[in-house]
Amino acid sequence: MSGDSTFAGRRIAGLYFSGQEIRDLLVAWLALGVAFTLFFVGGSGGISRILAAGVLPPLFVALATAGVAFLLHEVAHKVVAVHYDQVAEFRADNSMLFLAVMSSLLGFIFAAPGAVHHRGRLTPREHGHIALAGPVVNLGLMVAFVPLFALGGIVGSEIVTILGARGVAINAFLAAFNLVPYGPLDGKTVLNWSKPVWAAVFVPSVLLAFGLVFVVGLGFGGPF
């Protein structure tokens, strides 16, 4: 039975998403939400904190931060690919989704949930633009979450502060991770197109991610 039998294809903001693509995006969105929830509580040892918080609030935060970061990252790839007259669809990689959840239980995370596959003739520059679109969107989202983080402190809302902090941290992490020039990650394609462009985006992304996530610990702590 095909994915289209469960989810009907839809046209959203001028882009067509097949039934299978919608299903794969939803599955990956949920899996990454669970994985990042576990990651920020320190893995399996922090599950009691999630249960104490009632499960739904931690999952909501993860879907609104990691989930949105992932969805818009993949949609950005699709938008640019379609701009270059490609047939483009996201496909989840179930084995990598499993790895993301399992690694988060151990206190670290490897997030490569799938990819936007496209077909048609492209120049190296066009390939580079498609690959770069996802990390650039994550950097933009990182900036967009900063006011939310500040607002949480101003109004004294812990949930708003966590949303803002994790939105900033997750998007910084995803931008840096996806720009690593290895295997199927975006960085390899960008590097093959332009070393200066890759370095100009990768270096600040890594510095931001390392500083915010691993030095400052942004997004960690709180009730979950």
Image (cartoon, rainbow, N blue to C red):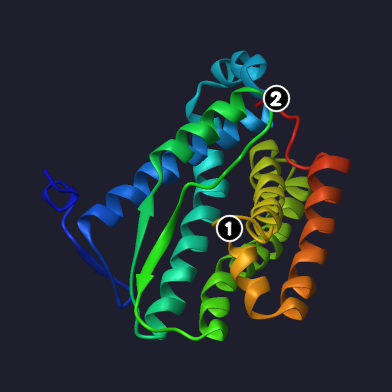
Q: Amino acid at mark 2?
A: Gly
Q: Is residue 117 left or right of residue 48?
A: left
| Vertical arrangement, residue 200 with respect to residue 38, above or below | below
Q: Nearer the viewer, mark 2 or mark 1?
A: 1
Q: Give residue 148's position: percent from left, percent from top.
A: 68, 55
Visible in this render: residue 59?
Answer: no
Comparing 112 with 160, the one in front is 112
The secondary structure type at the circle numbered 2 is loop
Q: Is residue 152 left or right of residue 208?
A: left
Q: Which quadrant of the figure contains the N terminus?
A: top left
Q: Give residue 54's position: percent from left, percent from top.
A: 51, 21
Q: Which quadrant of the figure contains the C terminus?
A: top right
Is the Cβ of the residue at disc 2 closer than 8 Å to that at disc 1?
no
Visible in this render: residue 159?
Answer: yes
Q: Give residue 4's position: percent from left, percent from top.
A: 15, 53
* Residue at (82, 49) in percent of width and height: 210
What residue does disc 1 label? 185
> Residue 48, located in which quarter of the rendered image?
top right
**Label 2 crowd bin: few (<14), some (14–19), many (20+), radius 10 Å:** some
Q: Is residue 119 left or right of residue 99?
A: left
Q: Amino acid at mark 1?
A: Leu
Comparing 203 with 172, the one in front is 203
| Vertical arrangement, residue 187 with respect to residue 110, above or below | below
**Label 1 crowd bin: few (<14), some (14–19), many (20+), radius 10 Å:** some
| Vertical arrangement, residue 53 with respect to residue 26, above or below | above
Comparing 171 with 105, the one in front is 105
* Residue at (60, 23) in percent of width and height: 105
Of the numbered discs 2 and 1, the one sitting upstream in the chain is 2
The label number, if any, that marks residue 42 in the structure image: 2
Count the numbered circles shown: 2
